[in-house]
Amino acid sequence: MIQKDKYGLEQVRPAEIEKRSFEIITEELQGRTFPQEQESIIKRVIHTSADFEYADTLYFSEGAVAYALDALRRGACIVSDTTMVQSGIHKKTLHRLGGEAICYIGDEGVAALAKEKGVTRSAVSMEMAAKLDRPLIFAIGNAPTALVQLYEMIQNGKLKPELIIGVPVGFVNVVQSKELIMQTDVPVIVARGRKGGSNIAAAICNALLYKIDNDRE
């Protein structure tokens, strides 16, 4: 039984706060079940956002989780569209597996080329990442233009990523870009609709990494 203090606050040890949070999430889902490989990812996204709509809107293409875990074990790099995603990824396991978190959004060459082309830095940074000779997972939490660029490179045979996490947030071209990337034959995890964000992208990356190694020290 959970004890409460005089303010009605639950008495939970700091080390057990996350565990208790997941217990509450499970309780509030009221017995709802998910495919085993997806459950921890969905619950971590809910934990990050306190938004239970993700239980309905988070889309997984067939085998996406298995493909992602295999790629991570082979040293895949995670390419993000924002430094916030990059910063939010728990890197201990990623580095141990030989991967790294990469973001080119602040690169001066990317900024210059984007200005010259009249496109977003996010789109150009996807082009730069595509040149890497590594297994690649793309985690897009902000820019729909990044998803569109990935779609075009895939369609043109210039890119074959291991996984795309497509969770940009907003109103302009967000829904359309997500639906577009779901039409490819690439494994995807997508937050359908307008919701998402860099924190959601990082949460999905971390949920995948925790499936391999739950040691977060």
Image: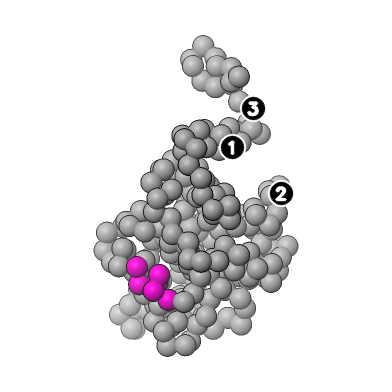
Give the residue at mark 3: 13
SS at badge 3: loop
**Residue topped by disc 2:** 215
Task: Residue 46: give its label.
Answer: none
Q: Amino acid at mark 3?
A: Arg
In the image, residue 135 above or below residue 48: below
Q: x and y percent of residue 48 in the render?
A: 49, 45
Number of residues whose C-alpha sits closer than 10 Å to that of mark 2, classed few (under 14), some (14–19) or many (20 or more) = few
C-alpha gap between disc 2 and disc 1: 14 Å
Secondary structure state at the residue bearing disc 1: helix
Q: Is residue 183 magenta?
A: yes
Q: Is residue 189 or residue 30 the one in the foreground?
A: 30
Which residue occupies the foreground of this view, 100 or 50?
50
Q: Residue at x 48, y 66 (%)?
A: 61
Q: Residue at 59%, 37% (x, y): give it.
A: 18
The segment highlighted magenta reads 179-184
The residue type indicated by label 2 comes to: Asp
Tag 1: amino acid:
Glu
Please name the residue that numbered disc 1 is placed on.
18
Query: Residue at 55% of width from left, 16% of height from top?
Result: 4
Q: Is residue 104 above or below residue 202?
A: below
Mark nearer the N terminus (2 vs 1): 1
